């Protein structure tokens, strides 16, 4: 029920249009513009930046105050006290699990980590230099050809099984895409390892000898997963919801999210950070590039600083910075050339009045890129790891969409083409 009413006066209409106004538990009020269609009007909002396209209970962001909440819990608390699979449970169910529920959830995920053996044959059809994201788009969509026993989107149990399978199998497929690119054999998952440990095992292990994941690196990887788990109605999540509104199966919907995430304006930010560091190349070149970043006539941008949503600071960045420092210390790579450039840029951004006044602080992508580089993960895999992390957010929003009355998405347009005209006579 609407809390308030808004009235819109339009030239040419005899009376004002009454529009319901709704209030959420957090955030600004929203005006229900659906009554406008009955008057022959649409709203115009390119990019949907001023439009609430859905109602959701999963994640809340206040970009001005630097707040990110999952199920009401601040991301800083979840990153400090929780772990990725517990956050997965929270996003799926709206509440943190009890000890027994968490144990059962972890058991289920661990027992779904293998993919159908025939999936391995898919990889032989790709070139060895294929981008891992291209492989992920194809293979995740292809899962529906192997797991068609749970594709009834109207069945809550089927939706749950699909969620379990996707959470469990994404690390396996991600690691397979990496192993294929370097010509190494695929490593089967190990159910005795934690979620992040298992991913590192499948990434860096070989059949020649046992791989023992470094606990500091495993913790860092788990935090990267947590901090990228969900981010409200971003481009890829909105894509998953829109694809889901057509009734498409969940694997196809998640594949569409991966495709959207692949865009450099969305999921490629931490990869762009490393590209920028490589372009700078040497600490002595930093002043020149900082000057270019300040020059409004120069198209060069410092990647990994500021955020479109967070106008103050990225709440995930503080957690990621501490993790970054731990990883660099553990690996003893503080003097590695690219990482030295990164640390110097970080210092400048936190001290230089130009960046401080504009609140261009290092964001989560800046630090996660440095961590992944230090661990030894190639830049081509950065967005794949983002997709792995974000799968829980995508499937949670997809499931939420199908858990309540819904309708197919159908955005409108402002048509500016030719008016109706007759086909010319020959």
Image (cartoon, rainbow, N blue to C red):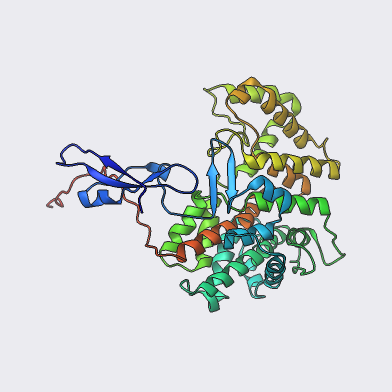
| 214 in relation to 189, above or below | above
Residue sitting at 68 percent across and 59 percent down?
A: 86
Does residue 127 show up? no
Residue 336 lies in quadrant: top right
Image side of residue 262 versus residue 220, left or right: left
Residue 184: give x, y in percent of width and height: 76, 62
Image side of residue 172 versus residue 359, left or right: right
Residue 32: give x, y in percent of width and height: 34, 48
Of 94 and 247, nearer the camera is 94
| 27 in relation to 337, above or below | below
Residue sitting at 79 percent across and 58 percent down?
A: 204
Image side of residue 309 versus residue 215, left or right: left
Quarter holding the N terminus is: bottom left
Of 426 and 221, nearer the camera is 221
Residue 351: give x, y in percent of width and height: 69, 23
Image side of residue 24 versus residue 146, left or right: left
Residue sitting at 48 percent across and 43 percent down?
A: 27
Does residue 150 show up? yes
| 56 in relation to 109, above or below | above
Q: In this view, which residue lies farthest toward the bottom?
A: 149
Residue sitting at 31 percent across and 50 percent down?
A: 412
Residue 258: give x, y in percent of width and height: 55, 56
Q: How many marks?
A: 0
Of 338 and 68, nearer the camera is 68
């Amino acid at each position: 029920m609407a809390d308030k009413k808004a009235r819109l006066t339009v030239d040419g209409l005899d009376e004002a249009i009454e529009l319901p106004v709704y209030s959420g538990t957090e955030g600004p009020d929203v005006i229900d513009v659906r009554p406008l269609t009955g008057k022959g009007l649409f709203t115009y909002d390119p990019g949907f930046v001023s439009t609430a396209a859905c109602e959701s209970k999963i994640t809340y962001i206040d970009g001005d105050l630097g707040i990110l909440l999952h199920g009401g819990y601040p991301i800083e608390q979840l990153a400090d006290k929780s772990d990725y699979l517990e956050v997965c449970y929270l996003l799926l169910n709206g509440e943190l699990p009890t000890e027994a529920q968490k144990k059962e959830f972890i058991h289920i995920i661990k027992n779904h980590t293998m993919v159908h053996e025939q999936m391995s044959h898919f990889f032989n059809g790709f070139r060895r230099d294929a981008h891992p994201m291209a492989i992920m788009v194809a293979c995740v969509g292809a899962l529906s050809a192997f797991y068609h026993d749970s594709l009834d989107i109207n069945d809550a149990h089927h939706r749950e099984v699909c969620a379990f399978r996707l959470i469990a199998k994404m690390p396996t497929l991600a690691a397979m895409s990496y192993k294929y690119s370097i010509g190494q054999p695929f490593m089967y998952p190990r159910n005795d390892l934690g979620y992040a440990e298992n991913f590192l095992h499948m990434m860096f292990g070989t059949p020649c000898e046992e791989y023992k994941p470094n606990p500091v690196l495993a913790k860092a990887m788990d935090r990267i997963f947590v901090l990228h788990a969900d981010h409200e109605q971003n481009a890829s999540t909105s894509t998953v919801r829109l694809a889901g509104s057509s009734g498409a199966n969940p694997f196809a919907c998640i594949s569409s999210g991966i495709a959207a995430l692949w865009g450099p304006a969305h999921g490629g930010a931490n990869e762009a950070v490393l590209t920028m560091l490589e372009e700078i190349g040497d600490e002595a070149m930093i002043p020149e590039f900082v000057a270019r970043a300040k020059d409004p006539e120069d198209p060069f941008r410092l990647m990994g600083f500021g955020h479109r949503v967070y106008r103050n600071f990225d709440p995930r960045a503080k957690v990621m910075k501490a993790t970054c420092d731990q990883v660099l210390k553990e690996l003893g790579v503080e003097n590695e050339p690219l990482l030295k450039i990164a640390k110097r840029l970080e210092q400048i951004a936190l001290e230089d009045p130009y960046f401080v006044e504009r609140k261009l602080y290092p964001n989560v992508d800046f630090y996660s890129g440095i961590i992944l580089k230090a661990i030894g993960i190639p830049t081509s895999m950065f967005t794949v790891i983002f997709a792995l992390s974000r799968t829980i957010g995508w499937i949670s929003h997809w499931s939420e969409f199908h858990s309540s009355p819904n309708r197919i998405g159908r955005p409108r347009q402002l048509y500016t083409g030719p008016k109706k005209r007759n086909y010319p006579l020959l």
